[in-house]
Image: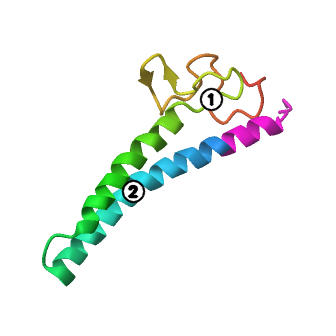
Amino acid sequence: MRQVFKDPSYEAAWQRYRWRALAHLGALLGGFLSAALLAVMRGAVLGGPVAGLKYLGLSWFITLPITSYRVARWPCPRCGHPFHQRGEVALCTTPSCLHCGLPKWAASAHAP
């Protein structure tokens, strides 16, 4: 049986990645849900346009690209280059670093 050594710095790095990914997902889904809720409120309560939709759209328009950028440019724990991005192309579903090949969720630099 092969023993796996866990590096605490890698675990901390993956935890930071997990938070960035959840923040992006929250911004994406939260914007849809908030817009739907405000649209229902507009029809049920006010019967007219809601000024809040403008501000929600503006905040969503600002937040979504920022969280997406932070996920795409997250540095690999092994090589320090962006894990999901090489050049201008970002592949956020890649199973390993596009620069050094470190597998996603690897516990140490000695992962295959």
> Which residue appears at 36% of the width and 52% of the height?
60
As shown in the figure, which amino acid type bears the numbered disc 1? Pro
When asked about the image quadrant of residue 99, the answer is top right
* Chain part drawn in magenta: 1-15
- The residue where tag 1 is placed is 75
When asked about the image quadrant of residue 80, the answer is top right
Is 23 located above or below residue 56 in the figure? above
How many numbered circles does the render carry?
A: 2
- Residue 85 percent across, percent down from the top left: 50, 24
Asked whether residue 11 is drawn in magenta, I would say: yes
Is 41 located above or below residue 75 in the figure? below
> Which residue appears at 62% of the width and 29% of the height?
75
Circle 1 sits in a helix, a strand or a loop, which is it?
loop
- Image quarter where the C terminus lies is top right
- The residue where tag 2 is placed is 29
Residue nearest the viewer, comparing 90 with 56: 56
- Residue 11 percent across, percent down from the top left: 75, 41
